[in-house]
Amino acid sequence: MFSNIRCLYFLLFLMLVLTGCHFGARTYSVTGTVNYDGQPLAKGIITFTPDGTNGNTGKSSMAAIKDGSFSVPKKFGVVCGAYRIFVESVESLGEDRGTKELFPTFSMDYHFPEGSNPPPLIINIPKNGEK
């Protein structure tokens, strides 16, 4: 039986595969930190989804968050333009007890500028998970 986090990884992988590639556009690496309630997020997943309503037809990207940090290499990076960023995390309840969400999926809008790698992103999620 898959744990919740394994199912989440599988669904995100499937989303990336089904989204396809955006050939010809220059991609950029993305790095940054994610804090939850003022502390580095122990582990989670960050997903970058192009915002088609704002003209971005790029590809989706994702990365694991570990000890508050994440890194998306250029090969799997973002193109310039508008994105929706999603952060998800769960905490273990112990062996054979499963997991629980730390907070509801956090989302935010971000516009990656054209021309160079973006500066490191710093995402601060308050304890209640609201923006």
Image (tube, rainbow, N blue to C red):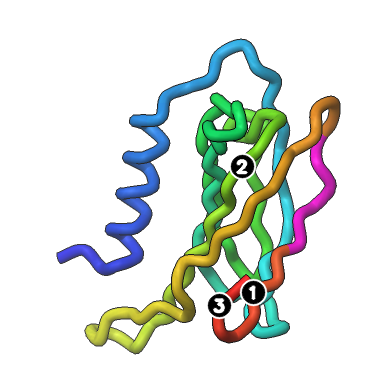
Classed neighbour count for the residue bearing mark 2: other residues with Cα under 10 Å, few (<14), some (14–19), many (≥20): many
Dot 1 or dot 2, earlier in sequence: 2
Per the rendered image, the range of residues in magenta is 117-122
Q: Are marks 1 and 3 in contact (CB under 8 Å)?
A: yes
Residue 125 is covered by the magenta coloring = no
Using the image as rendered, state which of residue 53 and residue 108 is in the foreground: 53
Q: Quadrant of residue 111?
A: top right
Residue drawn at x 38%, y 47% is 12
Give the amino acid type for the residue marked by disc 2 in the picture. Tyr
Residue situated furthest left in the rendering: 1
Residue drawn at x 45%, y 73% is 104
Give the amino acid type for the residue marked by disc 3 in the picture. Gly
Disc number at residue 125? 1
Q: Secondary structure at mark 2?
A: strand
Instruction: Kindly identify which residue carries mark 2.
Output: 83
Instruction: Kindly identify which residue carries mark 3.
Output: 129
Q: Tell me how far mark 1 sits from mark 2, CA to CA.
A: 18 Å
Give the amino acid type for the residue marked by disc 1 in the picture. Ile
